[in-house]
Image (tube, rainbow, N blue to C red):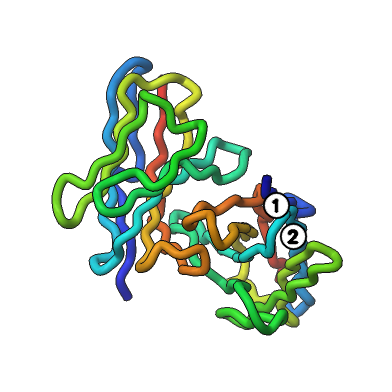
Amino acid sequence: AQSVTQLGSHVSVSEGALVLLRCNYSSSVPPYLFWYVQYPNQGLQLLLKYTTGATLVKGINGFEAEFKKSETSFHLTKPSAHMSDAAEYFCAVTRYNQGGKLIFGQGTELSVKP
Amino acid sequence: EPEVTQTPSHQVTQMGQEVILRCVPISNHLYFYWYRQILGQKVEFLVSFYNNEISEKSEIFDDQFSVERPDGSNFTLKIRSTKLEDSAMYFCASSASGGAADTQYFGPGTRLTVL
């Protein structure tokens, strides 16, 4: 069975600091990996995804993530945090034959201090 | 930009009552999904739907749940006899092709409170 673990339910950074949100997955077959962001009172919005090919994936709003098979990780980073990045972030996994069924981590709430 | 919409944003009901949660997926999308998130827990897959049939469902999606596409635009989730443990945020999503790599677009959710 597939699963996702996000380390840290709350992460706080200062504006301009590096953002690092951790995601580890478990999958017996090559995974497809996603990061979604949820702003207050809004739906989940796709930040980026890894399916095949280049392991460093760039997404919207300056975020990127690197698929590391050896570490079963897909950590999300952004070099410089902005106040508008404050939100909840979800990592999710699926696989090619799972018909779009996403398995989510528990989410990480990112706070950005001025 | 097209978006998935859900109504109502908040639904309060008494235990044992039936509720219908409504979603309008993106117009040219063919695959539809329901997820739920109980407060403090993970977002969980409930069901996927394509061509007027359920494609896959989780063990959570038992006989008290049903889905329907009653017309060309709406996608509904019905809970026949609500229980306290059904209290959660329910998210609808849609995708164009339904493939595992395809992006799912989520609505803002309906918060269901069962008293």
Subunit that carries the residue with mark 1: A
User: Could you say where residue A15 lies in the image, as x and y percent from the top left?
Assistant: 72, 75
Q: Are marks 2 and 1 in contact (CB under 8 Å)?
A: yes
User: Could you say where residue A55 lies in the image, as x and y percent from the top left?
Assistant: 71, 79
| Residue at the right extreme, as displayed | A70
Q: Which element is circle 1 on? A: strand
Q: Quadrant of residue A42?
A: bottom left
Residue A57 seen from this side: yes
Asked whether, in this view, residue A92 is left or right of residue A66, the answer is left
Q: Which element is circle 2 on? A: strand
Q: Nearer the viewer, residue B17 or A95?
A: A95
Residue on which the image places disc 2: A23
Determine whether A49 is above or below A108 in the image: below
Q: Residue B18 carries which label?
A: none
Q: What residue type is labelled 1?
A: Val
Determine whether A77 is above or below B30 in the image: below
Asked whether, in this view, residue B83 is left or right of residue A87, the answer is left
Distance from the alpha carbon under mark 2 to that under mark 1: 7 Å
Residue on which the image places disc 1: A4
Q: Which amino acid does label 2 sit on?
A: Cys
* Other-residue count near label 1 (Cα within 10 Å), few / some / many at <14 / 14–19 / ≥20: many
User: Could you say where residue B34 lies in the image, as x and y percent from the top left?
Assistant: 41, 46
Residue appearing at x 66%, y 51% in the figure:
A105
User: Could you say where residue B59 lies in the image, as x and y percent from the top left?
Assistant: 51, 32
| Residue at the left extreme, as displayed | B71
Subunit that carries the residue with mark 2: A
